[in-house]
Amino acid sequence: MPSPYARHLPATPLRTIVLACAMLGAAPVWADDTPVSAAEAASNIDQVTVVGSRARNRTVFDSSVPIDRFGAREVDNALASGDVGAALQALSPSINFPRIESSGASDSVRGIQLRGLAPDQVLVLINGKRRHTSAVLDTESSFAGTVPVDINAIPPNAIDHIEILRDGAGAQYGSDAVAGVINIVLKKARTGGSASVSYGANHTHFDPTNQTLTDGQTVIVNADYGVPLGDTGFFRFGAESRRRSPTERAGPSDAGWTSYNATPADLALDGKVLFKSGDSRQHNNYLFYNTQFTLDNGIDLYSFATANDRKSDGSAYFRYPGDPSNVLALYPNGYRPVTNGNKRDISVVAGARGTAGDWNWDASARHGGDRFDYGVSHSVNASLGAASPTSFHLASFDFRQNALNLDATHSIEIGLPAPLNLAVGAEWMRETYTSSAGDPASYAAGSITDAPPGAQAGPGLRPSDAYDGSRQIRSIYADVESDITQRLLLGAAARYSDYSDFGSASTGKLSARYKVTNDFLLRGSLSNSFRAPALVQTGFRFATLNFNSDGTALQTSALLPASDPLARNFGAQALKPEKSTNLSLGLAWKPAAATSLTVDAYVIRIRDRITRSSDLQSDAVTAYLASVGRSDIQSVAYLANLLDTRTKGLDVVLNHDLPFANGKLNLNAALNLNKTTLDKVRQSSSALSAIDPSLSLLTDTSLFRIKNASPTSKLILGADWQTAGWGLQVRATRFGELKDFSYDSDAPLIDGIPAQRFGAVWSLDLEGQIKLSKQLTLSLGGNNILDRYPQRVRETNNATYGGALPYNFINPIGVNGAYFYGKLSYTF
């Protein structure tokens, strides 16, 4: 019987590959005929977890807070494209990994969202140790002004399993754990190894150009190996290389009228694809190791490290031939600048753990560094005329974090049904952040005064705007947990942190779990968190080309730190820490040995939330900037504590394992419902009113996107069938409705502004594996195999910039269509 999906797939060899996976209807002759028992099928439900509790035997099911644990097989299946962020989005309904288009540095560094909050409001751990953030501020996404962890800098082939704590945990793990914690655990097998090579590509029908496209070709080669050290120690190491070609999802445009002069040469380009939308070209190289060795006295020495070198080419907007930003002698037909990102990320942790009396202790030191060199090619500084270079170094950003940790745990018998688990610890951390100037030509103002100064898709950072800052952070914490009765578990945590630049704060958490029966639990928690502004947020500055307020023209917008004198003239004040409270109530039910259901509701309130202001621009602003000698920019923006928000949501997770057809079948369903509202907005200041009293710090369109930038719901339905000889996984994901403002003035009004509703969209992923031998496995599959796209943007009144950008970039499904791949894996 033909697959029901066949009619949706292009008639190509790629389709044949996927359908072959779907039609694997009988196990190979070498499959084990022994049925999987119910006890074996239930093994995924009661996994011990590291996050959420410092008790050593706490499982996912009996925890007082909601935790997800994704094993090696699940993670490997979700890593088809090689992006760790995309894998997390595929695995968890609470995580989104939106793609950004034509946005400079965001083409290189993307952040994840947990429970609809900003990317810097989730803490990332590696083997339980804090991961450093990126050196680059997100300047143009829906959460502009945030500094995320670059999740894609973690080597994909180093991952053994992933734990996600969906609860506020600032008192337990420190700043940034507002929405929760993601703990990535590295491989540590003592012997053997694995190697794989995979090839994939997007193959899609692109409606705006009525073309069938094959692009985004991706080649991944990796290997890892374990060496025993002594009786119990190990040294696991590996490497990976991934090359990805770009995708192009821009449509033909008739935007020649947007050029400053709208010359005949500009208008003659109407109907052609001039802009760029889609994934950037990337080349990633990764290294990792994870090691442990036990001394004769019983002390364990351990260390692990990851390294990533990434080169990426992004995109900027097209410059028309007649525009003042062009030099006809260099680009007679106009040009589109290509942004260049060169990123190097490294993390090293070393420590020792052992026992002293009744205490277990762990002492460690870590270093994290992230450097981003930003440039642009196929560009020009039009004010220099034909003598201008066409490639520029725009700026370098460097963030480093060094820390020392001491943690200790102790189980105390105090007459309760279970010992009291006590954990205490201290941390010292030093952070540095520097930015350095670009090439002189990247910011120069040349002799041609009617042309904009500086490199296009820049300008570069000037020496006077470079930044060099540092700070120290000291923290202590205590965490207790115990079964007060046979049914009631109580936990409490407290943390005190002192920042050299933002003062001190105390945070706390209370949690409880009550066993109505051994298989039905009620749980809840109440906590508060303190997130000091990231050091990058206090010193980052850059200028970018962006749309003006009505979307009819491009302008150079300067993003300034709040301490900058020009920003202060527009009303900027010193940044304050964000403070939040998190309430969670839920249940966990295990109606059968191989079945579990969890339901958790949450409310997260954040006060003094840091966000990027809207671009402050008007005729009055233009006149003011000219009066202070800054005619090189047309608008000003800065970071400020502008919002108090409230996020409410519900998580539902259902798992069922069963023996099926000489194998094991896991069925799962997971749902997240999520909504953010604004409790308070700080819109103006006397300084801003003195320049232009009609301006507000956040426009209605900016506020609309903050409230509606995440899907209102996300549903994942999955099935994983394993036998000794082959396997099959199917995953269907429904991204719920989105709303975004529209540049179309005739669009329906939503909350008082022109906006568009983007309907829910389904994505279907499929993978099949077949063991060619005991050690060799062939995997064939596809992501979004039904070739779904978000709903298109309204095309009236140039809402798509003349047709150039037909799809809204905030939908997590992306704009690349179907992706098909094959992978050959060898274990040894």
Image: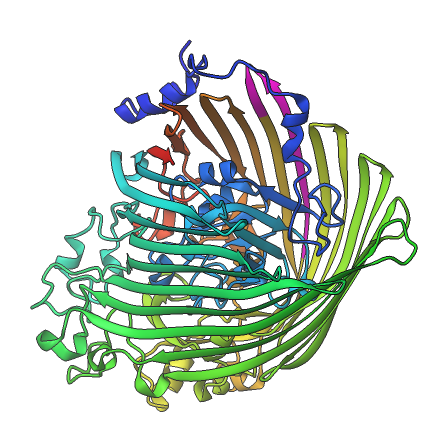
Say if 788 sits above or below 626 in the image: above
- The residue that appears at 49% across and 41% down in the rendered structure is 75
Instruction: Relative to 270, say whether 3 is above or below.
Output: above
Q: Residue 592's spot in the image, x, y percent?
A: 75, 26
Residue located at (40% from left, 83% from top):
467
Q: Name the residue rendered at 70%, 29% in the picture.
A: 595
The quadrant of the picture occupied by the N terminus is top left
Relative depth, front residue between 432 and 598: 432
Residue 112 locus on image (x, y percent): 50, 54
Q: Is the magenta stretch mostly helix, strand or loop?
A: strand
Rendering coords of residue 537 (x, y %) = 49, 74
Q: Is residue 66 left or right of residue 285?
A: right
The quadrant of the image that shows the C terminus is top left
**Range covered by the magenta-colored residues:** 647-665
- Res. 533 image quadrant: bottom right
Going by the picture, which residue comes out furthest to the front? 296
Is residue 656 part of the magenta span, yes or no? yes
Q: Which of 6 and 57 is in front in this view?
A: 57
Image quadrant where residue 168 sits:
bottom right
